Image (cartoon, grey):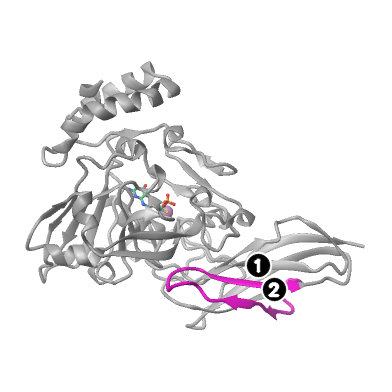
Amino acid sequence: MRKIECQPNLTERFETRRRFLAKMGKSAFLASLGIFGAGCEAVDRGLLDRGLMPVVLEDPQAAGLPKPDMLVHTEQPFNGEFVPHLLNDDVTPTERHFVRNNSGIPERAVRQDPHGWKLVIEGEVHKKLALSMDDLDRFPQVTMEVVLECAGNGRSLFVPEVSGTPWQRGAVACSEWTGVRLRDVLKAAGLKPSAVYTGNYGEDVPNDGSEPFSRGIPIEKAMDEHTLIALKMNGEVLPAAHGFPARLIVPGWIGSAMQKWLNRIWVRDRVHDSEKMSGYSYRIPAYPTAPGDKPPVADMRIATAWQVKSLITQPQASLEFNVGDAIKIRGHAWAGENQINKVLISTDFGLQWQETQLIQPSNKYAWYHWETELALANRGYYEIWARAYDDTGAAQPFSQPWNPKGYLGNVIHRIPISVVA
Ligand SMILES: Nc1nc2c(c(=O)[nH]1)N[C@H]1C(S)=C(S)[C@@H](COP(=O)(O)O)O[C@H]1N2
Ligand SMILES: [Mo]
């Protein structure tokens, strides 16, 4: 089994894996983790240097998935989110953080074993680094609450329908992340003047031989003091599903910039040109497009920061109230690189708006909270609409602007309720 799991040849590894998975049921597989965990360790130590490929599992249960009450879109790769009223916490607990995977989860992450793991920094640097967890622990540690939102969150609201995971509103969370500043690590490697972009890689190398998920960020964002190599989530070592042992946190930007299971940063002398940086992947048209229109690839631009957005987390959709009841309304708001100015709500389809109380975030890049209370004087069907405004004057649209892959959706959130006499 050790030989199978540490197979250096990619093609052969896939064949043996298929046999391996066919032979073993889920529970037998889980039981075996401890056994080959010990066996692989010595081999793992030289993993990167000798060019061996990490092993990726396609068994979400091994990584504790799905989480309770999760709305699961796909099991392989695993993608799941939560309905808005389950996201009411100020700081999202790990059990309520959505999971978005492009392929399987590395076996190392499931074993929670950092032995042999190295983060390689190479490319346009003076000194190539291969940092162990102990090396990273020696850099200053930073803790921040950061909104992490998939670029495709809200995709299911696009009309006409677009391809991709049909996220509703829950592919967003704001957890607390602890780690080291990416810029401290890049400084240790010494950036050459030719450095313009990072190319980020992780251990989740797909089983079908397709190009591994890899995205990058401009050097300016990489050198921003808030961009982290996170080692902890909500005070605990990173869970398997969220990138153990290290992931990027690129505050304000789309989730795909936040590489999980990070093991290599290739500093580049040009904009990173991997598959997930090209074509229609994580790219949006340079100009507004008619619904259903697909502009030429040359007119597509890399999606970066999120735009102004809000979520109603209370009340739960479709609740029934009595006339005159005090109805507590609450939620979050965030705006990528910008700050929130106000969140207004309406209960009459946008004819009249009222202010809510805005609660400042604990740090830049965490989400704001907002709340208010109201009573409805007549029975009937109502929708609570929330609309956030940022400090640039931008506000959420009433109707979702369209793009070919359904990215950066920020149409106002509406919660239906009914009031009975
Ligand atoms: N290595 C790796 N990193 C990745 C991904 C991935 O599939 N592989 N998915 C990205 C995308 S598209 C998103 S939205 C976030 C999701 O982070 P989460 O699963 O911790 O919520 O991780 C990003 N980092
Ligand atoms: Mo994403």
Give the residues drawn in magenta, as a range: 347-373
Ligand 2's quadrant:
bottom left
> Taking 209 as reference, is 123 left or right?
left
Image spot of residue 154 (x, y percent): 54, 57
Give the quarter of the figure containing the C terminus.
bottom right
Mark 2 close to ligand 1, CB under 8 Å? no
Q: Label 1: state its secondary structure.
A: strand
Q: Is residue 187 above or below residue 48?
A: below
Q: Residue at x 77, y 73 (%)?
A: 374
Specify the amino acid type for callout 2.
Thr
Q: Is residue 366 magenta?
A: yes
Specify the amino acid type for callout 1.
Arg
Q: Is residue 98 above or below residue 336?
A: above
Q: Which residue is mark 1?
A: 330
Image spot of residue 151 (x, y percent): 44, 58
Q: Residue at x 32, y 35 (%)?
A: 107
> Taking 308 as reference, is 200 left or right?
left
Mark 2 and mark 1 in contact? Answer it, CB < 8 Å.
Answer: yes
Image spot of residue 59 (x, y percent): 42, 31
| Residue farthest top in this picture | 23
> Taking 279 as reference, is 158 left or right?
right
Q: Label 2: state its secondary structure.
A: strand
Q: Is residue 186 above or below residue 337?
A: above
Q: Residue at x 30, y 51 (%)?
A: 246
Give the quarter of the figure containing the N terminus.
top left
Q: Residue 364 lies in what quarter of the image?
A: bottom left
> Residue 372 — which label?
2
Q: Is residue 147 magenta?
A: no
Q: Residue at x 61, y 56 (%)?
A: 84
Decide which of tag 2 and tag 1 comes sooner along the chain.
1
